[in-house]
Image (cartoon, rainbow, N blue to C red):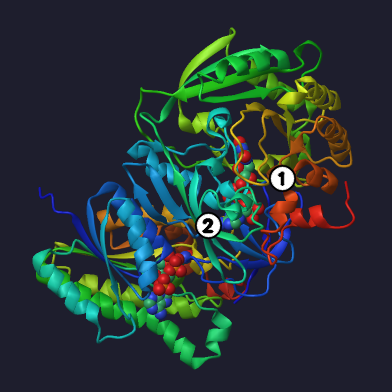
Amino acid sequence: MTATKTFHSWGKLRPATAKLLAPAWIPNDLPGTGPFLAYGLGRSYGDSCLLDGGTMIETRFLDRIQHFDPQTGILRAESGITLAAILRFCVPKGWFLPTTPGTSQITLGGAIANDVHGKNHHSAGCFGNHVRMLDLLRSDGSRHTLRPGDPMLAATIGGLGLTGLITSAEIQLVPIRSAHLDVELTRFCGLDEFMEISASSSETWEHTVAWIDCVASGNSLGRGIFIRGKWSDRGDLSTHRTARLTAPFEMPGFTLNRFTVQAFNTLYYRRFLGKTKTLHQHYAPFFYPLDGVNEWNRIYGKPGFYQYQCVTPTAAGTEPMKQILTKIAASGQASFLAVLKTFGDVPSPGMLSFPQPGITLALDFPQRDPATRDLFLQLDEIVRACHGRLYPAKDARMNARDFSQTYPQLESFKSFLDTKFSSDFWKRMTSATTPS
Amino acid sequence: MSTRPYHAAIFGATSAICIETLRAMAREKTTKLLLIGRHPGRLESVANDLRSRGAECTTLVADFLDPKTNWLQILTDNAQSDPWDLLLIAHGSLPDQDTTLRDPESLAAELHINFTSPAVIAAACAQILVKQNHGTLAVFGSVAGDRGRGSNFIYGSAKAGIDTFLAGMRHQFSQHRKIKIVTLKPGMTDTPMTSHLPKGPLFSSAEAVGTQSWRAIQSAPPVAYLPGWWKFIMTLIRILPSSLLHRTKL
Ligand SMILES: Cc1cc2nc3c(=O)[nH]c(=O)nc-3n(C[C@H](O)[C@H](O)[C@H](O)COP(=O)(O)OP(=O)(O)OC[C@H]3O[C@@H](n4cnc5c(N)ncnc54)[C@H](O)[C@@H]3O)c2cc1C
Ligand SMILES: NC(=O)c1ccc[n+]([C@@H]2O[C@H](COP(=O)([O-])OP(=O)(O)OC[C@H]3O[C@@H](n4cnc5c(N)ncnc54)[C@H](OP(=O)(O)O)[C@@H]3O)[C@@H](O)[C@H]2O)c1
């Protein structure tokens, strides 16, 4: 029985219809002719997790822990286990993920295939830096156990699912004494102040990130809140709860506009008085503020939304990021939740890993094409000029030339492709005509 | 109070709902589990998952369609040294209704795995519990058994059969106060069994249903709807006049 299914990515821009494989057990081979693509929980924003007309392999039933060593914190599990499930397992035992993105609703395989980064990138590097081993199933039925040093591992980490199906992986967890963090919030105004706080925090604060208002202009341009945290010694080892709220339906387009966004951002910015505030915060609100509401992506309504995430390299200074922020503010198109962070210089393990030393900005935009794409083209120019790059996990529209020129290991990567794997993103990046 | 681990045998231990039931159990109790199924490799991966969660597990490969089978002796022998607290029957199969109706052999096989097999196992398990005068027998039925509906009555009728079978056994053993017989009735649950179906708002996660199954096993009502609101929905569907039901595609 082959069912077809409509798949969405998080941005809900263009759904894909594909044949469905939903193995309950690690398969020995992949039935059919392909092309194939693994699908975790579809938390990628653009089209890197979609393959219209192909065969998509849902991994979420592959969720078993294979081995855990409570002495060393080494965990081996099937690739469809979610980070949320890993945490519910390991936090009570005093262990945590070595690094985590801003949602726990992603799979282990998805975390590896996008080589995701988190608030501790400046000290921990990417998720892939903590992968000790993984098992890969290729479309020819061959199985590969990959360890650091193996070039096929470097291709698979951050490899966008294009080297085959990751069936299981082993990661190194980190010890914690409490499930809580000591957190400090500091208001800042402008990128220079952000850079100062960032530089002075990187040695002593394990986790840093900033929220920046991309709607405010004039005197408030670049205002934001710098958030830094470190694991606390106080508090219990309690886990998070599952979300109770679900966004009820697709919101009508008018609920998100310049005025509501501005009001939200002003409220967020003014949520405490004075310059700084300290908190004792559980890991769930600290790392996963949005996980409390299921399917919050529905607030963007039917048209869907984009996320634009770029990195501007350290060598370029702050000027390009300033230009980007100014352009975005002037456009009036941004939505809430712009996230700014400095990447450290821990080398990324994957050939196509996104992080490189510099400043990264991630920000949602309701889809209002052609205006939204036009703005992105202008932002691309700034990113291109400073030799920065865009994050494929978030992308639905980057230019194929930019992709090939800003990912210098792309050619070496290609020799590790599984020729029967593909994605809508990959087709976009490799087709002869390149829509911008 | 004894510190003896909670002792349970599980038929169909590789089912997704069942794995979540056992995970919830292992979170709360020291457990000693016998996992029974037909695929040694799958049983071993479930056992490893549960072992990492603190459960002591052994696995047993058995053919649920063969009444002359190994499990009965093993269960009986085990009960002598360490009485069973729980015997759980979870296997089931959701066939494609149309193709199965046209193929008598697979029709018989589906009825067999969904009714005959769990009924035979349940009857034997009940005897073991009576002999130890202790323990709970829990079996997965389904809301699909509450009313025959055009879209899935092969599966539904078998589940209805097991529901009636268990109700009868509850009656038969009503004098045995220390023995509980529970019918677990999940509603639509997102598991490999339903992976090909489009997911509407009535679907629950295997984790939610499994956790609630474990609650139900502990409180041991005769019948537990999982989640509880399915009782309300099924009451409505049961009282719906046929003239109305027949106009739907349910
Ligand atoms: C609210 C929110 C916050 C986020 N914050 C961050 C952040 O801070 N940092 C960051 O880096 N990202 C962030 N992301 C993006 C997200 O972490 C990544 O897109 C992640 O890879 C999604 O994982 P997934 O399991 O949903 O995989 P999917 O999105 O379904 O797939 C992602 C890619 O992985 C591949 N893949 C999945 N499973 C396998 C497998 N078993 N074998 C081979 N390939 C596989 C897919 O083919 C696809 O190419 C965020 C996303 C959201 C929604
Ligand atoms: N999912 C739902 O929506 C839903 C709703 C109501 C009731 N239920 C019932 O809940 C129980 C668990 O369901 P689930 O969704 O968790 O199912 P699942 O993950 O699909 O697992 C099905 C289980 O049945 C076993 N099985 C199937 N055919 C078999 C056979 N011929 N011989 C031996 N074992 C066989 C499987 O063993 P293998 O691993 O060896 O294949 C597996 O353990 C079932 O009784 C099901 O009918 C499910």
Residue B165 percent location from the top left of the image: 30, 76
- Residue at horizontal 56%, vertical 90%? B102
Q: Earlier in the sequence, mark 1 or mark 2?
A: 2
Q: Amino acid at mark 2?
A: Arg
Residue behind label 1 places its C-beta within 8 angstroms of ligand 1:
no
Residue A201 percent location from the top left of the image: 56, 17
Q: Quadrant of residue A324?
A: top right
- Residue at horizontal 72%, vertical 40%? A300
Q: Residue furthest bottom?
A: B104
Q: CA distance from mark 1 to mark 2?
A: 22 Å
Residue B230 percent location from the top left of the image: 45, 59
Q: Which mark is residue A392?
A: 1
Q: Is A72 left, or right, of A336 in this rendering?
A: left
Q: Which mark is residue A346?
A: none
Task: Provide the secondary structure element on which disc 2 rests.
Answer: loop
Which sits in the foreground, A316 or A270?
A316
The chain holding disc 1 is A
Q: Give the position of the N terminus of chain A as an image quadrant.
A: bottom right
Q: Amino acid at mark 1?
A: Pro
- Residue at horizontal 21%, vertical 73%? B125
Q: Nearer the viewer, mark 1 or mark 2?
A: 1
Which sits in the foreground, A287 or A172?
A172
Q: Is A326 left, or right, of B22 in this rendering?
A: right
Q: Which mark is residue A60?
A: 2
Q: Assess disc 1: are there few (<14), some (14-19) or many (≥20) residues with their C-alpha within 10 Å of its C-alpha.
A: many
In the rendered image of this protein, does residue A264 appear above or below residue A5?
Answer: above
Say if residue B64 shows up in the picture. Answer: yes
